[in-house]
Image: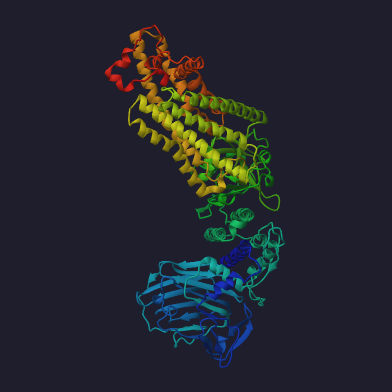
Amino acid sequence: MEFCLRINLFTAFVSCIKVYVQAAQHVKHPGLQVLATASHYWPLDAVDGIHELWDQIGNRPGYVNGSNINIVEGMVNKGIFLNGDNGGTFLHFGNYQNSCISDPTWCGPEGITFSFFWKNYEVESRFAVASGGKVISNGFSVFTNTYGGYVEFYTRGNNHRWKANIGLPGPFWTHILFTWTKKDGLKVYINGTFTAGDQAGSVSENYGDPYPDLVIGTGNNKAYRHYLTGAFDEFVIWERALSAYDILLYYSAAIGQALVSATTPGVSRDVTSTAPTVRATEVSPPVVSSQREEVQSSQDPESLPVLGFLKALPNRTIPHNTANNLTQTFLKSVEEVLSSPGLPEQSIPVVSGLIETVDRVMEHMVTNLEPSPNSHLSLGGTSFVADYSLMKFPQNYDLSHYRFPTQGKSYISVPGEAFTMQSQTTIVGLFYHNMHNYYKEISPAKTRINEAADYKDHKIQVASCLISLKVEPSPALSVNLSGSPLIKIVLTHVLSKEQQEQVLNQSNKVYLYCAFLDYSSKEGVWSNEGCVRSGGNMTYSVCLCNHLTNFAILMQVVPLKLTTGHRVALSTIGYVGCSISIICLAITLVTFAVLSSVSTIRNQRYHIHANLSFAILVAEILLLISARFDPGTLPCKVMAVLLHFFFLSAFAWMLVEGLHLYSMVVKVFGSEGSKHFYYYGIGWGAPLVICVVSMTSALNSYGEVDNCWLSLTNGAIWAFVAPALFVIVVNIGILISVTRIISRISGESYKVHGDANAVKLTVKAVAVLLPILGISWIFGVLAVNTHSLAFLYIFAVFNSLQGFFVFLFHCLLNSEVRAAFKHKTKVWSLTSSSIRNINVKPFNSDIMNGNKEGVTPTKMNTWDKSTNSANRIDLSAV
């Protein structure tokens, strides 16, 4: 009986929590929607005509057998009182031959549910509700006697029986609901809470005649002749097995449980009852008292309706088995609350309140656990919500050390010297499995963590499971965190994929705090007072604390920012470098145009140089202009598209530079004409295709955030980064191949001629090739991933001066260009002096090979060998 009362208390608690997290508007109670899905519903609030009972949903009337009935105050409006002591009076709801109601073998996989309110005045053995005959036949029955009661389901076909014992209902309204399915068997719910069940059932060898009638107040067998004294109300049948959540919703609606209205954040929440009015004054006292207190508590929008429940907990000794069942039932109820659909909208205050409630209930449980005078008591287990351990130690018990949990990488450890053991000591440990998932975004302003408040614009997340330990009397711990003894907490980090990416991103600074939920105010607030993180890395943390409560690791990710001085310096380098590059690239293009009539400058290599120079020139001009436009405007969007195209074109022509160099030095392939076609397709066609696809799929990603460029938040930036990285990787491979060949040729030349300058050719070739292959952009990748100032400055210098280096190495210092310029000036000089018939020496391979007049041409033997015929290349080409 006492256990049943405790179950009633838990039912009231869960009902209030369910109502609270629904946060419904002033609409129809969801429990009434569950009722509307019933197959049969007899309110039992009236007896019309010849004692007719109306089925308001199934439209199937029943009747009252006998005259000893009364209409009384019911659980919902009116109810029917049956006086079985003065004659054969019972309620008959009809014949249900070949149906799930009278024969469970007719039930499909959905199962069936029966529900009614019962006020019992009977102490002798009686059937309360029966269908399909007694236990020896098909159907079900609810039976009660002096010692208790039970619910049975039975099938004649396979000789099977399911039986669940229940507490004896008293002279107050009690809700009885039971479900049955072939898969889960029998489940019995008392006042909305699961109480007992029988999943597998057992074999019964008894047989009997089937009686397909459905009755209340007597057995189904016509020869039974015993009648129950008691009141009944709200008899409902669902031809499906209700879920625990649906049962709770219907029960809360039937008893008039209030809903909390929360239509708008910040608006006061009125308690409004939309369920049928409860007129009964004789409802189970524990349920009513706890409900009233909880509804009053729920009027405070910042607290959970749990205070009444905690006050209503019985303050008496609890046997070990009862405490174990009670703990499992309670945690199961908490699981149902966490699975409520409305919970995510208000998760943090609700979950914080749940954690406090679980802690306090467990403390109450272990305090009232039946003691053992000479040995310690332990109660532990696991559930969906948490792993738990309840320990009670007698006075003067030798406890050298305590750790919870005893296994695993996450735990709390209390040193032995912290325990006084001068009186009975209780310990409650809880390791919550999923509570941390509800703390996704915590405002630093709503915490008591001073370090986090310095970065108030960056949210905090819980990065580990929550763990709790409570010891009474409190252990003697050092006030100073540098002293001893202290509590040691080790917690493994539980990071989502997004959190892992944030941690691995070197441009972020990750702050980890050892924190706990402080309930000194109305709601739980995260604080780190009295705790310090003493060790660990990004996978786990070690904390030392001088108190006990709920602990977790909080993580705050703060993007690193450059100081104003560095930003100004980098910006200045960019503007100056781009300006110099623009001037140098313009000179380069003019030079190539003027010298285009010279045969050596008219070849494919300088054509590629000219296209690359043009792409970089336009890109850098647009980059300087784009700084004048505001993000989000149409001009800024247009500039972003043009920047995307021309920077992609610059990289595409860098790739062409690499492929052309590869074809000249490593492997000769294709004719000049065919390569010319492919080169233009790569240089201008590929960037155009990428830009069109990007604009079609994500036009809003251009020029919308901080500058006139691609968005960094939605992944659009990869339309530039991916092709750029591809070009860099390919060109690095080409550079390595070319460098190896040049190094080998230079080494052979040094052995043959002893020319020390030839050994330096490798270093010179790398310096010349870097600007046109775009290898210097690798510093940009390193700068983003490591956020190193050195790489940022190196990237700023090399990137902004790329045009200058192209002019320097491929125009100003290039021997072919200089020779062509001399030849061109000589032609201009001859033309201007009107000397028409002079025999001008042809501009031939002597000039290409750098041979001076009057000097016998000399070729390097290594370049003439047949084995190196594929590697014939003028040094100026590199």
Near-viewer residue (396 or 470): 470
Q: Quadrant of residue 735?
A: top left
Near-viewer residue (765 or 398): 765
Quadrant location of the N terminus?
bottom right
Return the x and y of residue 91 as percentages of the image width and height.
53, 86
| Residue at screen point 35% across, 10% down | 857
Return the x and y of residue 867 as percentages of the image width and height.
28, 19
> In the picture provided, is 728 more to the left or to the right than 573?
left
**Residue placed farthest to the left in the image?**
866
Quadrant location of the C terminus?
top left
**Is 331 drawn above or below residue 496 in the view shown?**
below
Near-viewer residue (288 or 61): 61
Return the x and y of residue 528 as percentages of the image width and height.
65, 41
Looking at the image, can residue 787 be seen? Answer: yes
**Residue placed farthest to the right in the image?**
268
| Residue at screen point 44% across, 85% down | 221
Near-viewer residue (536 or 450): 450
Looking at the image, can residue 492 be seen? Answer: no
**Is 243 drawn above or below residue 848 in the view shown?**
below
